[in-house]
Amino acid sequence: MAKLLKIESPESVVEKLTSLEKRVIAPVRDGKLHRFLPVKRKEEVDFGYFQAEGSMKGFFFPATEGILKFSTGTKMPQVEEHEIEFPETFVVGCRPCDAAALPIQDKVFEWDYVDEFYKARRDSTTIVSLACTCADNNCFCTSMGLAPDSPEGSDILMVKTEEGFLAEVLTKKGEKLASLLDLKEKGSSEDRRRSAVSASKLITRKFKSEGVPGWLESNFEDPLWEKMCTKCIGCAACTFVCPTCHCFDIVDEPVGTSGERRKNWDACTLWHFTAHASGYNPRDMQHKRYRQRIMHKFDYYPDKFGKFLCTGCGRCIRVCPVSLDLAEVLEEISSRI
Amino acid sequence: MSIYSPDLLKVSEVLPETSEIITLVMDFQDGSLAKRFSFKPGQFGLFGAFGEGECALAIASSPFTKGQIACSIKKIGKVTSSLTSTNVGDIIGFRGPYGNWFPLDEMKGKKVFFIAGGIGFSAIRSSLLSVLENRNDYKKVVLLYGARSIDELVYKRELAEYEKSSKIDLIKTVDPGGESKDWDGKVGFVPSVLEELAPKPENSVAIVCGPPIMIKITVAVLVQHGFKRKDIYTTLENRMKCGLGKCGRCNIGKVYVCKDGPVFTAAEIAEFPPDY
Ligand SMILES: Cc1cc2nc3c(=O)[nH]c(=O)nc-3n(C[C@H](O)[C@H](O)[C@H](O)COP(=O)(O)OP(=O)(O)OC[C@H]3O[C@@H](n4cnc5c(N)ncnc54)[C@H](O)[C@@H]3O)c2cc1C
Ligand code: SF4
Ligand code: SF4
Ligand code: FES
């Protein structure tokens, strides 16, 4: 059973950490949106937010990152490793659906070959999430086996109860932080239970997801794909805001005779993703590219790693310029099972 | 060293193959790696030209040649254009070997049909050289090789040797219109020439490499002649970036071609969704 401690507020956690000169990443208001940014003072932070525009994925797996430096000026190219160092960092106040994306990404970047860039960041980061107190109709975490207060991926989970804020310590990293913050007073598990009940009521959009992988496996060429997914324009916005999407490209970016080899986010919904050099493209139509996104998330990944490659955060639905609603496609599928 | 860091190879020979294809023979720069490095026929590498990028290429040399590898490259885009214009002494980045391989040991005691189209030959050359090195372990070795035109046939020097050799039966062909007056091979697409050849499936395996469409038709012809799908091997050449099962590029159904392949049997491929 997880340890329960009392905290004054999420802001107080930021205050304490910044006073200790720790690197803190937290939601910051940016116009109408919120973004995760490094902060120096608790006043910069806004925890009264619904969901940040992008997830915090980019702190572990940046949209673009150098993996190698080279210079080609001489006959013998000079190749230099990128330093893999990352300061100790505390993410404070991310949503549980974003925290839950981290163990999902861990599997990809740490199976068989370990991506040292990703791992260095993960190892030096502590995640303090904040359970949701609001949701919209695009949220569907409960259908993905999660909840507005689920602990997956968090080292400490902060929950608001009638009596104040509780901190649920979940991991060793969490314990270390709790002692750093000097958190001692114990909250009651009754408070926590009540908060969990009220959190689960937030999500109204629900469908049965258990049968989805099986349906996907045997209906690769169902007319549903063309019918529901042709309208995708292949802009990749959905994959870039997604906390679990992890596909990337490797490209050289030279400036004169030197430059960097970089890992850049890429997306299966983009037409050139699978285009062979010969001109042949196995996914020659847009609905096939969108189908890949769904297949990967709800059949291929679960088959390999045992859970969905989706936390139900709803970002892809909110951001899609043509209102292609992932949950609607999944609802249609689950209605057929 | 991160998993994306290349080893360095120095080009020791540049062999022109066709107007668009060259073969590079390369030595490992790092002496201890040169001693340590080994690979199995069918595996590939990510070859890089610094400033241009990396691309996946089959290792085309014999696994018995130590400290040195070769690959054959068709100029088609950014990286391949750069690699095909390298000179002796140039340095190339290499990551690998990656992927699985042809189970040549399991093929011992059998007739082996190598069937290749165009630059696809480079993906089976390593296996062919390996089989010829251990020729007595195999019953019969047949190579059916075709390209669009005479110019587009790679490894012409070796083809000339095979023609004279009793170790291997060579059938070479070019597409109709690609022949010249003095062409001494066949004229016709690989699958039709295979049809004429009527290969016997008993105690036989086939290794097929070439463009996707050629593979599809050739496999169909082999199956018609009684070959079991599990005895037909091929390599898939999906677009790749990482080679490590992470970037998502080469995914077909539940497999990552870079990790679970590139070598698959036709039986395995028959189970894939039509997404390759
Ligand atoms: C396992 C394996 C083994 C292989 N073995 C060999 C081999 O032995 N020999 C060989 O010659 N080849 C081999 N290939 C194929 C080889 O990898 C490709 O030919 C190579 O990757 C092409 O790279 P490139 O940078 O030259 O082409 P690119 O510059 O990437 O261009 C290729 C094509 O992709 C499209 N494209 C790329 N980027 C964009 C963009 N941003 N926007 C629009 N269109 C774009 C274009 O249509 C272009 O024509 C192999 C492939 C695999 C997977
Ligand atoms: S697929 Fe959509 S709902 Fe699922 S995690 Fe990604 S952005 Fe969120
Ligand atoms: S589903 Fe929507 S957001 Fe995603 S690529 Fe298609 S159009 Fe863009
Ligand atoms: S090439 Fe990156 S996953 Fe296969």
Image (spheres, rainbow, N blue to C red):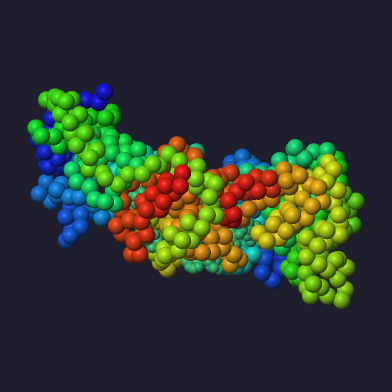
Image quadrant where residue B143 sits: bottom right
- Looking at the image, residue B211 sits to the left or right of residue B228; the answer is left
Q: x%, y% of residue A235?
A: 39, 64
Which residue is painted at 45% across and 57% down in the image?
Answer: A290
Q: Nearer the viewer, residue A37 or A256?
A: A37
Q: Position of residue B173 (x, y in %)?
A: 81, 65
The answer to whether residue B32 is above or below residue A179 is: below
Based on the displayed image, in which of its 4 quarters is residue A34 positioned?
A: bottom left
Query: Across the whole image, how many numbered discs are drawn on residues?
Result: 0
Q: Residue at x 28, y 39 (%)?
A: A147
Residue A9, image x, y percentages: 11, 38
Q: Is residue B77 left or right of residue A225?
A: right
Q: Assign the N terminus of chain A to one quadrant of the image.
A: top left
Residue occupying the point 16% across, 25% down: A190
Picture quarter with ligand 3: bottom left
Residue drawn at x 64%, y 64% is B74
User: Where is residue A219 shown, x and y percent of the image?
Assistant: 53, 50
Of residue A242 and residue A58, the one placed in the foreground of this image is A242
Query: Does the rendering let one see residue A163?
Result: yes
Asked whether the viewer can see residue A311, the reply is: no
The one of A80 and A210 positioned closer to us in this rendering: A210
Given the current orientation, which residue lies at the most extreme front position?
A336
**Viewer-proximal residue, A312 or A49?**
A312
